């Protein structure tokens, strides 16, 4: 008999039908009631066994975490908590889980403990819900771009260029670290390395995506990126996934329009398709918030926060206007900001971004026209010579979620900016070629996928929205 899923059975229960289900035991009560879950839904299927007719040795093996295959008849449930249940006729233990050894017992576990059990934490309600929402978001990303005429493009993971110019990259090498070949001046001779030069894991697929946008019109990458940033925070990962669209013939305004429409689309998709999981995550977040001081609690419940994003236009504000608002704000004047704002040119921190979204405008905000000195070399310089056509999208509870810009299409201006910032022209000769042959206005943005998942699920730590987090001093699993 073909396996049914718990989700399919509960969505369309066919009473008195013989079905087969495979899954993992969540609980086993009174030697009679098995709560079986197969990961397809938050809900369990109650399976009722006749313990008097069951082999006692088999009965002892029905423990939390064990994998079972059960066959039986679907009937209306007499008990509370479920509409239907399975009257078990046949039961097979596919894989045992010894109760003294299996770590995910049916009790409350801390997030720290579950991170140590990252290979098993997916069997909890919280992580099942998070990962189903994440999967739906991933599908919505591809659906949005495909239906809007974009082509999916895979940027290289190994690269010789540093797109962000920050230098926080993981080196890729096959040289013997104990005895590498050396140059005459005593440095490592990377010409003897596998690629014949120094290479790293990518921090962004943007530069390569620009090249393809300048031939295909509209492309997007959705792949892993790596930052060797020694940041042990709840918002940073060393390995994460980035969504990066690049569009030929788009200026900054068109770029902002696209980013806003895209985010609202994917969040709306989750609201329409993952409500059961979102309601569970909302309750979980509300319980967690009760343990925090009043001042640190969110003013909005999770689903309300998602509708906050989907149901109203984003406010567009220049960096200069934002600095004035922040400089004159009560928290700044009363020295409540950890990073006080006193002059134009300051790099905005998460506390400033959240103040603008949550307290001042009370809607998502797009900041644009940032000082050139705090932004990357590839962003288009404005006529004032001081600002660039950059934009960041700010969300409640999280601050910046999207960073993008109109790209610098003028060869002479780009070369000058690269020289000022010490970016190697020889390494990026091909990038400069794009400005020599058929250059045009073009734009794009980047969105860290895990940060979007974190916002959508209400999880407090980004390490809990990726299956196996890579962070400083941690590459377990």
Image (cartoon, helix red, strand yellow):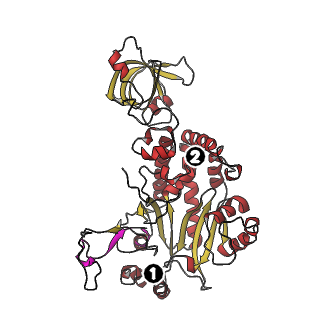
Residue 179 vs residue 46, the one in the foreground:
179
How far apart marks 1 and 2 lie (CA) works out to 40 Å
Res 80 → quadrant: top right
Is 408 left, or right, of 100 in this rendering?
A: right
Is 339 left, or right, of 145 in this rendering?
A: right
- Do the residues under discs 1 and 2 have CB atoms within 8 angstroms? no
Q: Is 156 rendered above or below residue 56?
A: below
Q: Characterize the magenta stretch by its predominant secondary structure.
A: loop
Is 175 left, or right, of 110 in this rendering?
A: left
Q: Is 204 rendered above or below residue 286?
A: below
- Sequence-first disc among 1 and 2: 2
The disc at residue 439 is 1
Discs 1/2, front: 2
Q: Residues within 10 Å of mark 2 (few under 14, many from 20)?
A: many
The answer to whether residue 385 of the structure is visible from this angle is yes
The answer to whether residue 144 of the structure is visible from this angle is no
Is 308 left, or right, of 474 in this rendering?
A: right
Any magenta on residue 202? yes
Q: Position of residue 407 (x, y in %)?
A: 50, 76
Any magenta on residue 476? no
Instruction: Spot the residue most to the top.
Output: 52
Residue 467 vs residue 147, the one in the foreground:
467
Q: Position of residue 427 (x, y in %)?
A: 36, 80
Residue name at image x 41 percent, y 58 percent: 473
Residue name at image x 56 percent, y 82 percent: 381
Q: Residues within 10 Å of mark 1 (few under 14, many from 20)?
A: some
Q: Position of residue 37 (x, y in %)?
A: 44, 32
The range drawn in magenta is 188-207
Q: Give the residue pinned by disc 2.
A: 271
Residue 102 vs residue 142, the one in the foreground:
102
Dot 2 falls on a residue whose secondary structure is helix
Residue name at image x 68 percent, y 78 percent: 343
């Amino acid at each position: 008999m073909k396996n049914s899923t718990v989700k399919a059975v509960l969505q369309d229960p066919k009473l008195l039908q013989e079905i087969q289900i495979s899954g993992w035991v969540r609980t086993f009560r009174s030697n009679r009631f098995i709560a079986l879950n197969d990961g397809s839904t938050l809900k369990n299927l109650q399976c009722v066994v006749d313990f008097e007719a069951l082999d006692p040795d088999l009965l002892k093996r029905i423990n939390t975490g064990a994998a079972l295959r059960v066959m039986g008849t679907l009937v209306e449930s007499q008990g509370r908590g479920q509409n239907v249940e399975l009257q078990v006729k046949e039961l097979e233990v596919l894989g045992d889980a010894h109760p003294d050894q299996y770590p995910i017992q049916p009790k409350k576990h801390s997030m720290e403990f579950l991170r140590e059990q990252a290979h098993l934490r997916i069997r909890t309600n919280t992580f099942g819900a998070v990962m189903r929402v994440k999967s739906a978001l991933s599908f919505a990303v591809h659906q949005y771009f495909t239906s809007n005429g974009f082509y999916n493009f895979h940027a290289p993971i190994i690269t010789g260029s540093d797109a962000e110019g920050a230098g926080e990259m993981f080196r890729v090498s096959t040289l013997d670290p104990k005895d590498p070949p050396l140059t005459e001046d005593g440095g490592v001779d990377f010409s003897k390395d596998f690629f014949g030069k120094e290479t790293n894991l990518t921090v962004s697929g943007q530069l390569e995506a620009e090249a393809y946008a300048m031939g295909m019109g509209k492309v997007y990458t959705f792949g892993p990126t790596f930052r060797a940033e020694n940041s042990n925070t709840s918002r940073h990962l060393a390995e994460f996934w980035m969504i990066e669209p690049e569009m030929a013939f788009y200026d900054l305004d068109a770029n902002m329009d696209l980013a806003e429409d895209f985010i609202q689309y994917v969040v709306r998709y989750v609201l329409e398709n993952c409500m059961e999981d979102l309601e569970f995550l909302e309750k979980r977040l509300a319980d967690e918030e009760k343990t925090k001081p009043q001042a640190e609690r969110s003013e909005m419940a999770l689903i309300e926060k998602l509708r906050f994003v989907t149901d109203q236009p984003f406010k567009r504000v220049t960096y200069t206007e934002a600095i004035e608002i922040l400089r004159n704000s009560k928290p700044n004047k009363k020295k409540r900001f950890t990073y006080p704002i006193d002059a134009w040119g300051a790099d905005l921190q998460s506390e400033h971004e959240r103040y603008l979204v949550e307290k001042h405008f009370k809607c998502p905000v797009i900041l644009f026209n940032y000082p050139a000195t705090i932004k990357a070399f590839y962003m288009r310089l404005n006529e004032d010579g001081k600002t660039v056509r950059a934009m960041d999208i700010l969300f409640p509870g999280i601050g910046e979620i999207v960073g993008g810009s109109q790209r610098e299409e003028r060869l002479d201006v780009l070369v000058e900016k690269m020289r000022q910032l010490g970016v190697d022209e020889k390494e990026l000769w091909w990038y400069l070629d794009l400005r020599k042959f058929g250059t045009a206005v073009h734009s794009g943005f980047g969105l860290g996928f895990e940060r979007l998942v974190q916002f959508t699920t209400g999880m407090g730590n980004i390490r809990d929205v990726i299956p196996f987090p890579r962070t400083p001093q941690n590459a377990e699993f």
